[in-house]
Image (cartoon, grey):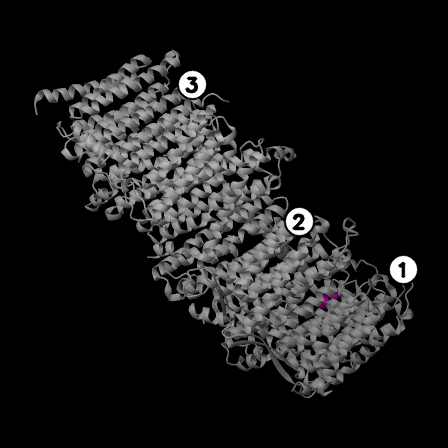
Amino acid sequence: MTLTLLALIPLGGAALVWVTGRFRPATVRVAALVVALIQLAFTCVLAVTVATHTPATMTGGLTSAASTSFWLLRVDGLALPLIVLTSLLGVIAVLASWRVELRPGAHFALLLGLQAAVTLVFLADHLVLFYAAWEAVLIPMFFLIGGWGHEGRRHAAMKFFIYTFAGSALMLIGLLLVGFTTGELRISALSSGILDPTLRTLVFWLLVAGFAVKVPIVPFHTWLPEAHVEAPTAGSIMLAGVLLKMGGYGLLRFALPLAPEAAHAAAPVFATLGIIGIVYGAVVALAQTDLKRLVAYSSIAHMGFVVLAIATGSPLALAAAMLVMVAHGLTSALLFLLVGQLYERTHTRSLARLGGLLATLPVWATIFVFASLASLGLPGLAGFPGELVTFLEGFASWGWWMVAVALGVVLAGAYSLRAIREVAQGPEKPEWAGLRDLDLIELAAAVPLALLIVVMGVWPSVVSGVMDPVARALSALVGRG
Amino acid sequence: MNTLVLSCALVAAGLYGVLTRRDLVAVLASIEVMLGGASLLLVAYAAPGVATAAAGQGYALLVLAVGAAEAAVGIALLVSLIRRGRTRSEDITEVRG
Amino acid sequence: MSVLHEMPYLAVLVPLALAVVLAAGVRFWGNAAAWIALLGPLTGLAVGIASIGGGTAGTFTWIRVGQTVLRLGYDANALTVVMLLVVGVVASCVMVFSIGYMHGEKGYVRYYALLSLFTAAMAALVLAADLVSLFVGWELVGACSFLLIGFWYAKPSAAEAARKAFMVTRIGDAAMLLGMAVLWNATGTLELSAVLGKAATLAPGVATAAAICVLLGAVGKSAQFPLHIWLPDAMEGPTPVSALIHAATMVAAGVFLIARVWPLFEVAPAARGLALTLGTITALGAATVALAQRDIKKVLAWSTISQLGFMFAALGVGAWPVAIFHLVTHAAFKALLFLSAGSVIHGSGTQDLAEMGGLAKKMPLTAACWIAGVVSLAGIPPAAGFFSKDEVVASVLHAAPWAGVALFAASALTAAYAARATRLAFFGEPRGAKPAHESPWTMIAPLALLAVGALGLGFAGAPLAALLGHEAEPLSVPIAATAVSLALVGAFLGWRSARPEASADPRFAALTRAAYSGWGVDAFADRFVVRPATALARMADAMGDRLAIDGLAEGVATMASRVGGLLAEIQSGDGQWYAALMATGVVVLAAAAVWLVR
Amino acid sequence: MEQFLPFAPAMFGVAGAVLAMAFDAWESRLSALVAAVTLLTLGALAAGWTAMATGLAGQVLRSGGTFSIAPAVCLLLGAVALLGCSGSLVSDRTGSRIVALGALTASASALVAASADVGMLFLSVEMLALCGYGLVALGGTDRAREAAMKWFVQGSVATVVFVIGTAVLLGRTGGSMRYDAIAKLAATGLDGPMAVGFVLVLSALAFKLGAFPLHSWMPDAYETAPPAAAAIMASAGKVGPIAATVWLSLAVTAAAGERLIRVVAILAICSIVFGNLAALRQNSLARMLAYSGIAQVGYALVGVPMGVRSASVLVFAVLYGLTAAASFILVEAIRRFDPSWDGTIRGLAGLSRRSPALAASLAAIMFSLTGIPLTAGFWGKFLIFAGASVGGYLWLAIAGVLGSVVSFGYYGAAIRSAYIDEPQEPEIVGSVAEEVGPRARVAVATVSVLAVLIVILGTAPMVSGLAPVLNALLK
Amino acid sequence: MSVSVTLLWWGLAALTVAGAVAVLLVREMMRLMLGLGVFLVGIAGMYAWYGFGLLGVAEVFVYVGGVLVLFLLAITAMGRDSESRAIVRRFDIGAATVSVGLGAVLVLALGGMLPGTSPVAGATVERTADALLGTLLPQFEIAGVVLLVGLVAALAIVGGGEEK
């Protein structure tokens, strides 16, 4: 019941908000905020309950023995951090779109609907439910990009939908093969032995097709920058913050357990792609002239760490994958939030036109510098633990290839510092004189993220601890435990 | 064998007419040729066995009836086109793409 | 006191807390900020004193998955104590000095917040009992240096310098990450006690690799050739910052690091050799460059690089206690020199030697302190610099004569540029545009304190060595004599060759220009690293991402709709063609059927 | 007597048509409409009742169990389509004739679905065809008559093909052409003539379905026919032939036809590729829907070779029929709502602001046609592809899902126009919509109800599960 | 089987083929209709030859007496502009290939299943009537419905032609 509520609160909230939007447009955002906060509080309570309980899992939904329902839910160390992240970013997204004038009812309803769908992806314990939620995520995102996006939104919305749909369509075939050859549709019951050995490699790659696009793994990433640049702020926050995590989650939840030996065999490929992603993403980010595009490519680089960690597959590395995912969820969300707030004021994201904002918008720029430093993996901030551990563990498996990753680390510094240099530092520009600095609502959105980034950096075990048992079990499967 | 060849030939010939004649009237006529050939085959197959013969004739009658109905509809269409002065197949190539 | 002894990490937490407090009230504290911030280094100092003769160590669990654990640990051992004292003293002096120097600056509180943060990070670095927390401190001091160099963010040159400093050091940091990975892979832990304990048992290849990676990290941080290019630019920051970060503490962290992990280098001769070579090259090369500088801070910056070179050379021959000794004395006299320079700049409003001159009359106290520093730098007895540098040269000469000779030359050059700068700044005719004035007591007092250190610390050599568990080599008279005489000669030449006008001696114009530009290392890096990288990035974006990868994705879509258009052409509107099409279909299907059941 | 029970449902429909014609004589279209709708609904109920009372098995028409579902659905869809388009059916002069032929189409399709005998199949398919020609011609325009004529020519060729097939099967089975007789014969092994006979009949069905390359009539017909007619032909008119294809294929291939059935796979892949790609470039909404219909038929055929699993095809057919009917009623509704609409997809721009209800229904329908979860369309494709991927036709399943991906290129384009695009000219429509409003009301209401139904059908199984169908698939 | 019967078959075959060829090639509509009539008669003869007298008679009545008349009406409605335009022939070869292909495939496929070569007295009127009112009764009824539909459709088409 609890878990069902977890999925239904934002859903019901969406309906409520939409109705409110028809009659009292002014109060919509408040309603949305209230719903999101309730969800967050509820999630936190749940998280504490589950995390302190051993084993750290909880099942829910219509689980009566006789029922043939697809509505089976389950939370474990793998899903929990991501669910919390989702609820958190849900609140942030609502705050980020506080000033949406255009059809606010629909906008907030879509946001909450998106949140519900993503939460359900992480909650689902039934293949069909999982896939349904997975695709359902596309719908609100499609409308968010298309309805509230920027100039190129027509194309971006379609591209986002079709590109990711292409991946998940193949994934569907993989899931169908799993479900209908084994006759087992409960995700938690999908153990490594269950799938016919002759099918495993095929299924593995079919599933990976879906996840690789979502992560995204280079070279299946080109939908991301476009979607990000065109999406409204809240959309970008959810997209970078949680949607990309669905890919990593899928790899850990399905690809590894179902076809361990295939995963083991494919590990070098993934490591290579991960490393390529780290370096390539950073290199391309370095060349961007659009601030939002730059952040988007930095996301690609960071998700490269996730892929690399998963390929490494040791318990610590898998925990690191989760650390990087959560950390990136916080950091990129903060960065996109800031970029959005900046765009509201300057109506440009061009690095060439920005500059000197430390003088113009001191508070904003300070937080921006902080976020950029976090994004380059500064120790003491969220990015560091996961990337460090990935690095350490990766060396054990991939040896001196990690030199390339080290290069990526340097380049991460390069693009982050470039962003700081072009945006925050430099002489104050008369063009931007007299812009108003962040107000309370905007601070309320940014500051919690900043604080959490510090917390994650200092006390990563809050996440890795929850992940611990799952990580050990998984890496035992892929034979690196 | 002969009948088989004959009816198949008739069908083929009718088809050729349908595909090549320009006057819609001729096209419809060619259709009748095809249909005739086909029902001839039906009859020829049904004829031998005493049991099948009756059923065959029955079916043939039904086919005949249906064919007539079709012909009626076809000619109705034809007339409705002729009224608009479109009597040849190249007059009706408007709907495309 | 016992609290400080039991909880040395207070040296980190207190300044950190202060930094947060200051940052929180950035609009509110005003001039009180300095005194609040001062508590930080003083705590560090207190912890250092409290931990003399054995401090406490401990760990916190950071990440635990299964059996594998990453711990954050602290350990107030002798070396740490020394560094804590250095950091505490210098930081306190700088903070006090800044009261006057930064007075009325926009961002006064921010300045002190960053200084406190730096103090905390530095303390964390030196207190670290494992490579993780060491690296944390290591990166954070780098970040603070970035933020402080870019303190005047509106100034493009400052912003560029800050970025450059962070980027160049980050190259070293990446290498250091690799070293950590190697060690983690080889020993399964990053706790220094354990790692160093196992150091002897490491495969030579592994040990060398790890040592070299760590060394590269140190090279980046301590501005050794070829990663030294960031330090001169870093002078864009406020002068007190240069004194604290870019002379006394952070740049010395490399030396500290190598000394801290010495057992590793013990088993990695190749790494030692590399350290010696780089150190020597740097010591000599930087000294020549310093000779040609016109900006007083640049002179000091290159001098710092050169002196750090001395330390690396000492490390290279295994004399790490000596290196630490020189680190301490250098911290004293170089901080002194920087602060004096700061005072000069404050007083005369310029930092171009060509526009100074004759300041000794206007700013006698500053001049006195400066001269004390210069004497110590040049290695004239009985100043502190003499003893430490003598020990360095002696030990190097003993192990690697060629390097020793080079260092002799370097020390001579040191004396030369010191003398030159002194003459240009304080003697001869006043060339300054506006009248200079002496600085307030808040600036002079720290100078005095440091001057005492610069002159007197020479006698701290023996106790220091004892503290570090070694015995200091006795002063070898011949070497000392050679060094001193060389220094005097150098000083004399430097004094004579000092010419105020911008253009150097025409006979050596080209040479001077080359030296002035740091022998073109910077230009080289720019042409062969920075620009290619940028070009590559642009190409990867344009050709790779937009054209190739995205082009492929988009191309598939366009192709599909093109083909769709062609297929729609099939619907030509000719009914007979449709009939033909379908008849063909029937024929094909029938044929297929016959074939399938054949 | 009991053998005539299976007729009852269809006969209700025919009676409705007759009544409609009668009322037409008195120019009272409303009563004609009401009569037809009522009787079709009654027919559907009757079919449902025969489904309840299993075991009622006529000689040549079957009823009971799944055999009654399809006919019921045909009749019901017919009723819904007529109801949805009642606006124009009542106002236009030819309304009652459309009603009559529509009711006949539904009945014919019901007979097609219920046929258990090739001869009966032949007759009902011809009936369906004749209705179609009439309905298209009722578009009243030159384009409509032209399309009808072309369709008639192709249809006659199909008839001939069917007759030849019948002849062969008759000769083979000796008198009786009932499916069970054919199955008995097929069990003894398929030879060339038998195969050809089957394939010829199959081709005739494929022509009714509009599978590539026997599809050419569909775009013309759907585009030029009155929306009501298109709605019926695309929904009711498809469900019957799909069901018939399943039954016939089962009869022929259940025993020995695994290889032979690959001809269906060929048809399926061709239709999927052609339909999806050709639809990408369409401007007219109706024509786009027609092309996409070719692809949808392809998906349905993917399920046919699954033998016992092909029950999932019926589920697909029903859900698709529902969505297709909704989509063409939507076309009608938009026409009613905004007479200035030129029928193009681009012309939908700004619909979301002019009529949120219509736009939302459009989104639901298009997502359902794409097969996105939470809509009815998903379950159909889900079951089909599940069956195919485990039934040894993995490549077909993959082709199918990729086809669905492509299909969003045009379905999504419609949604995009309705929600994202800005209308070219400033909307004067507001006022027009006011006075058109009342006439559009029924259509809009019907579409909205159908859209809601689509979503409910899409979401409910998440909770209820699909136990029966899944068990069929999992075994 | 006697020679005369065989000759009769060949005669009828010649008749139908002649008619078919006329339908294919003749330009002038009236002559074409004549050809069609000949063809239909020939077919009817074939039915009779196979002993399906009833069928033959029906064929003559329905087609020659009904359909053909409709054709003639249509032609008269059409006027005489038909052969004024030159006959352009497109994709003859293609059409020929398809047609021949269809015929060939059928012949080859059905080669193993030869139709009867001689008339039998099986299909007497009584038997046929029994069949139609017995096993084929449902079909018989539906055929009636089909005719009704044809009527309605024709009405709809012709009547619906006016507006717009």
Q: Nearer the viewer, mark 2 or mark 1?
A: 2
Is residue C288 on the magenta stretch? yes
Span of residues in magenta: C286-290
Residue A335 percent coordinates (x, y) = 65, 58
Disc 3: which residue = B86
The 10 Å Cα crowd at callout 2, few under 14, some 14 to 19, many 20 or more, is few
Is residue A380 on the magenta stretch? no
Label 1 and label 3: CA atoms lie apart by 103 Å
Rendered position, D121 above or below B73: below
The 10 Å Cα crowd at callout 3, few under 14, some 14 to 19, many 20 or more, is some
Chain ID at mark 1: C
The 10 Å Cα crowd at callout 1, few under 14, some 14 to 19, many 20 or more, is few
Residue at disc 3, secondary structure: loop
Disc 2: which residue = A23
Residue C149 percent coordinates (x, y) = 74, 64
Label 2 and label 1: CA atoms lie apart by 73 Å
Looking at the picture, do discs 1 and 3 lie on one chain? no
Residue E113 percent coordinates (x, y) = 17, 35
Count the numbered circles shown. Answer: 3
- Label 2–label 3 contact, CB within 8 A: no
Residue at disc 2, secondary structure: helix
Disc 1: which residue = C433
**What is the quadrant of residue D72 in the picture?**
top left
Which amino acid, by three-letter code, is at mark 1? Ala
Which amino acid, by three-letter code, is at mark 2? Phe
